[in-house]
Image (tube, helix red, strand yellow):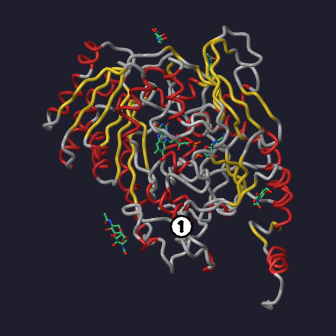
Amino acid sequence: MPSSLPLSFALLGLFASRVLCGGVTEASWKALNATVGGRLHLGVPFSQPCFSRTSSNAVNVPNPAQCGEIQALYEDHLFRSSRFGGYQITQWETCQTTGDECLLDWTNTTNPAAFAAPRQCLQGSVPSYYIDVTGPEDIRAAYTFSKKKKVPLVIKNSGHDYIGRSAGPGTLALWTHNLNSIALSTGFVAEGCSNEPQSAVTFGAGVQFQAVYDFARTNNVTIVGGADPAVGATGGWSMGAGHGALSPAMGLGVDRVLQYKIVTPDGKFRTANKCQNPDLFFALRGGGGGTFGVVLEGTFITSPAVTMQVAVGTYENTPENTVKLVKALGKSATQMASDGWGGYITPSASGGVWANPLLDVGAAQKSAAGVVSAFESIGGGVSFFTMPTASDFFDTFIAPNTDPVGRPQVQSSRLIPDHLMANDDVLSALATAMVSSDFPQILAVTPYAFKDFDKNGTSINPAWRTAVWHVLSMNVWNFNSTRSERETAYQRLKTVWTPVRDLTPGSGAYFNEADTYEPDYTTSFWGPHYAKLLAIKNKYDPHHLLDCWRCVGWKGPSDPRYKCHLPAP
Ligand SMILES: Cc1cc2nc3c(=O)[nH]c(=O)nc-3n(C[C@H](O)[C@H](O)[C@H](O)COP(=O)(O)OP(=O)(O)OC[C@H]3O[C@@H](n4cnc5c(N)ncnc54)[C@H](O)[C@@H]3O)c2cc1C
Ligand SMILES: *[C@@H]1O[C@H](CO)[C@@H](O)[C@H](O)[C@H]1NC(C)=O
Ligand SMILES: *[C@@H]1O[C@H](CO)[C@@H](O)[C@H](O)[C@H]1NC(C)=O
Ligand SMILES: *[C@@H]1O[C@H](CO)[C@@H](O)[C@H](O)[C@H]1NC(C)=O
Ligand SMILES: *[C@@H]1O[C@H](CO)[C@@H](O)[C@H](O)[C@H]1NC(C)=O
Ligand SMILES: *[C@@H]1O[C@H](CO)[C@@H](O)[C@H](O)[C@H]1NC(C)=O
């Protein structure tokens, strides 16, 4: 191109010839942008401001102020989720098959080896474009565009999904993060129903748990939520099951939701509850996010404020101690769950924390005697505390010790049923998985003591109801990984979790915290409900405008949007 050509003319030529995202022209994107009121944006990788090169070695002018903030807050859950291009589990910002990425060194975010030239900031699996969703019209526009232009859609909320369901190369994303309304109702009746009014709270789809717990404290109510300040209350969490420390006593997210407002792929804005679109409501209560439509808001039961009894165990984290601890804790785990305790055992934090909203101080100490002796048997100990509210429990014991994010982490997990909880082979296999992974955790968060659930109303695997522990582990890599290191991280999970699966036949795994390559995933996630869920998926999304990895109706890995997933180990 002659250098004398005026700049605007040169740009015009560039635009006319630039064909992005599956052969869609710049003009089509412009038209979509006009339809959504200018809220269409390019998906920019989270760490791009640190890089001086983008794809094809094009120059990117680094922004030192922005880069400094990204480096300082690289593992901050709320900060990461506030940026469209930020994913908590960072292999989903990358392309695992090719190694394309735009990551920093999570062990030292100022390490220039990750971002200085010749390294380039590559798009990886960050969606090409996104719409900052404000209402049903944006969602309808995206459906129409996707159907006409064959651009795959993804729904992204906080970006916590462990198996990449809120990312995808060459996709158009619907970002629900800014739907942040919260409204309390003391006399809520689901639309079209005629039951007794009850106390409930309605969240816009972007509302995150820190805001939920703050709201609960301010309004002197209890809201069951997860153990992370930045996970969304209404998105993937509530639709996939949704556990927290209160779940053993008060139920899962799917047990507490009363109503969703959703735009289904036929473009209809619907209310889903027990009285309207009950099939859809059933599917949304456990069938998973990203599958049946874009949810705009969810309404959840609120309960009176509760006092929480808290037990904190500490020990010296050595592999030998962890093995002994897992085996000892297994023996009292079913009794603890029956008594309403929810908890987390985290070897990397050298301890565990349990909370109970049902017992008083004396009863709590008696109930937790098995936990005390388990810790004492390896030279550790347990302390007891009383917290005035669930929000105080969250702020004091959970939020300061959140699970690590901002790094590539691959995960596997299993629900452990009550009748196998004291089984020595099962506990040995779990202990082996714990000490053979980079980040293991036992979550005592199943709804075990909560018997007042809607028997046929939720679509989670019924294995959740008789499970006592949800046990998981993760392996990590860094910015300079090789493909073979990435494959090994998955392979190591397969090696330790295959025996656990084999020893727990008929159980399952948590849709939201599962192995990327979960075998027989339809049974594992939904048990007997899969056929019904599939029929509902086909009814509301016959053209498969919304498909995601190992979701209901998934057609397998051959679609180009999954080209960054490695083959199963
Ligand atoms: C650090 C960490 C801690 C966690 N802690 C817990 C925990 O304590 N308890 C627990 O149960 N789980 C926990 N999880 C798992 C969590 O529930 C899932 O990652 C969940 O999918 C997050 O949902 P999201 O909407 O916030 O995230 P996203 O990744 O944005 O979305 C997850 C899925 O939901 C879909 N989705 C999101 N919003 C909508 C919407 N409005 N309409 C339709 N589909 C939507 C997306 O398409 C995607 O498929 C944790 C995860 C991480 C990384
Ligand atoms: C969409 O339009 C808005 C407002 O004109 C603009 O700021 C934005 O950059 C446009 N998006 C894209 C992807 O061009
Ligand atoms: C992090 O990297 C920077 C830049 O290379 C270096 O100066 C610093 O010492 C490193 N910090 C640690 C804790 O290794
Ligand atoms: C908060 O709610 C609890 C339980 O309903 C009640 O006992 C308490 O008096 C309330 N506190 C305030 C300050 O309203
Ligand atoms: C639940 O479904 C089963 C099997 O379809 C049926 O037998 C049972 O009556 C239902 N229970 C309720 C409470 O609706
Ligand atoms: C990758 O980076 C880490 C962290 O900076 C470093 O310790 C390691 O040696 C690097 N590995 C290779 C193969 O360069």
**Residue found 67% across the figure and 53% down from its top:** 555
Residue named by callout 1: 102
Of residues 267 and 370, which is closer to you in this image?
A: 267
**Residue found 37% across the figure and 63% down from its top:** 108
Question: As displayed, is residue 523 above or below residue 47?
Answer: above
**Residue found 59% across the figure and 40% down from its top:** 236
Q: Is ligand 6 within 8 Å of the beta carbon of the residue shown at mark 1?
A: no
Give the quarter of the image for residue 337.
top left
User: Residue farthest to the top?
Assistant: 196
Mark count: 1
Residue 188: x %, y % from top left: 67, 15
In screen coordinates, is 563 left or right of 103? right
Question: As displayed, is residue 440 above or below residue 13?
Answer: above
In screen coordinates, is 298 left or right of 11? left
Q: Residues within 10 Å of mark 1 (few under 14, many from 20)?
A: many
**Residue found 40% across the figure and 69% down from its top:** 111
| Circle 1: residue type | Cys
Q: Secondary structure at mark 1?
A: loop
Give the quarter of the image for residue 350.
top left
User: Residue farthest to the bottom?
Assistant: 2
Question: As displayed, is residue 499 above or below residue 510?
Answer: below
Residue 254: x %, y % from top left: 57, 28
Of residues 43 and 173, which is closer to you in this image?
A: 43
Of residues 210 and 296, which is closer to you in this image?
A: 210
Residue 289: x %, y % from top left: 63, 41
- Quadrant where the N terminus sits is bottom right
Of residues 7 and 272, which is closer to you in this image?
A: 7
Residue 400: x %, y % from top left: 37, 39
